[in-house]
Amino acid sequence: GILEVVESDFAKNLAKEESEEEDAQSEYDKITQENKVTQKMKDQDVKYKTAEAQSLDKTISDLSSDRETTNTEHAAVMEFYAKIKERCIAKPDTYEERSGRRQAEIEGLKQALRTLEDETAFVQRKQRGSMRGSVLMAR
């Protein structure tokens, strides 16, 4: 009696424990497999992200170099522009410069006027003498 009841209880408990153990093992195997898949995915992510980071580092390096070159070219162009601008944009003359030029022009015009007056007087004297002579000769 009692042994049979104990044996029956023991068999039931053993079957229950084995079933639970199998379920736990099955759950463990399932989680282990999921973890392996997740680990592989994360390893691949690390690999791709490392490659992407290296590619981005190279791109940054290239763009930084391009920027330095562009900045150097820009500085040279701006320097050239400043020189050209200095030569091309009219600067107002000072009063002294304008006054000096005006005075020189006035003196030049006065000299030209004197020369023209002297030449005109000389030509008129010559013509008068010629006219008198021709008038005298006509008589």
Image (tube, grey):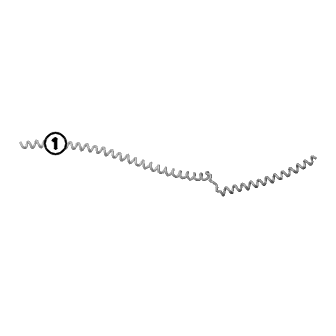
Instruction: Where is residue 41? Give x, y as percent.
Output: 33, 44
In the picture, the quarter occupied by the N terminus is top left
- The residue at 55%/52% (across/down) is 78
The relative height of residue 84 versus residue 3 in the rendered view (above or below) is below
Query: Closest to the observer: 104 or 81?
Result: 104
Instruction: Where is residue 80? Give x, y as percent.
Output: 57, 52
Query: Closest to the observer: 125 or 41?
Result: 125
* 127 sits to left or right of 111: right
In the rendered image, the residue lying farthest to the bottom is 96
Query: Closest to the observer: 2 or 76?
Result: 76
In the rendered image, the residue lying farthest to the left is 1
The quarter of the picture where residue 107 lies is bottom right
Badge 1: residue crowd in 10 Å (few <14, some 14–19, many ≥20): few
Instruction: Where is residue 33? Give x, y as percent.
Output: 27, 43
Instruction: Where is residue 43? Give x, y as percent.
Output: 34, 46
- The residue at 75%/55% (across/down) is 110
Total tally of numbered discs in the picture: 1
Identify the amino acid type marked 1.
Lys
Q: Label 1's element?
A: helix
- The residue at 89%/49% (across/down) is 132
* 62 sits to left or right of 95: left
Query: Closest to the observer: 66 or 96?
Result: 96
* 3 sits to left or right of 84: left
Q: Which residue is mark 1?
A: 16
- The residue at 49%/50% (across/down) is 67
